[in-house]
Image: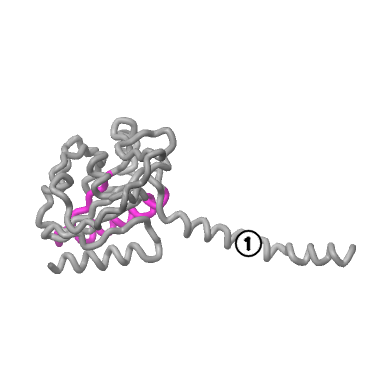
Amino acid sequence: MSKENRKENHFLTPARLALTILVLSLVAVVGASSCNSTDEIVKPGPVSINPAKPAPAAPAALVTLPAAVLDAELQSISKQRIKLSDYAGKVLVVNLWATWCGPCRMEIPELVKLHKEYRAKGLVVVGLSTENPEASEEGVRRFARDYKMDYPVGWVTQDVAIALMQGRDAIPQSFVISRDGRILKRFVGFSATSTPQQLKDVIEEALKG
């Protein structure tokens, strides 16, 4: 065996190959902290972005939910309508998600835990899918059952989604809203190492108010 071949074989040892695969896997996991709302191919939904249309200038950050968002009647999996204004006086977490979004699937169990832990103290979580309600009705209902989503679940309309997302169409997005209607924190994407604790901290602080 030549000296050059021996060097090549030494470089590609099983241990180094395994380490390379591990590093690439971690990069993939870290990079998948959010999904683009247009990632759902050939599944038109209420949130649709025209790639040919120039992106608008970034608006000022929302301080409170607009009346058009609070009073919008949103379809739910229970067939009853969801109105965010019905939860005035509660600490509210509004979560925009989709069944096909990997980071959403990671975040929702954390939201379920938080809702169970704090609902007696005044927390309400509302999960709003960005998918087409007609095409995804069975899938969203099955997903909510499988993930034991015991809080209100429904679909966001295009107008409400645009008002909330403000040009950032990545999901999941979660808004923590105080009892008096102020947006305390907006989370875009999900990190398994930081988001759950950050959500919990903001919710606990809001519940003190």
Identity of the residue drawn at 63% across and 64% down: 19
**Magenta stretch in the rendered image:** 102-128
Side (left or right) of 65 relative to 200: left
Number of marks: 1
Please name whichever residue, 37 or 106, is drawn nearer the observer in this view of the structure.
37
Q: Residue at x 25, y 49 (%)?
A: 164
Kindly tell me whether residue 145 is visible in this rendering.
Answer: no
Residue 43: % across, % down: 39, 34
Left or right, 55 with reference to 175: right
Q: How is the image coloured?
A: one colour
Q: Residue at x 29, y 34 (%)?
A: 133
Residue 54 shows in the view: yes
**Residue 20 spot, x, y in % from top left:** 63, 62
**Within the magenta stretch, is there residue 36?**
no
Mark 1 is on which residue type? Thr
Q: Is residue 125 above or below residue 20?
A: above
Q: In this orientation, which residue lies closer to the viewer: 119 or 128?
A: 128
Could you tell me which quadrant the C terminus lies in? Answer: bottom left
Where disc 1 sits, the SS reads helix
Q: Residue 154 location, x and y as percent?
A: 24, 41
User: Is residue 125 highlighted in magenta?
Assistant: yes
Residue under label 1: 20
> Could you tell me which residue is drawn at 52 percent across and 56 percent down?
28
The quadrant in which residue 72 appears is: top left
Task: Specify few, some or many for label 1: CA neighbours under 10 Å numbering under 14, 14-19, or 20 or more.
Answer: few
- In the displayed structure, 85 sits above or below 46; it is below
Specify whether 1 is left or right of 101.
right
* Quadrant location of the N terminus in the rendered image: bottom right
Res. 23 image quadrant? bottom right
Name the dominant secondary structure of the magenta segment: helix
Q: Which residue is farthest right?
A: 1
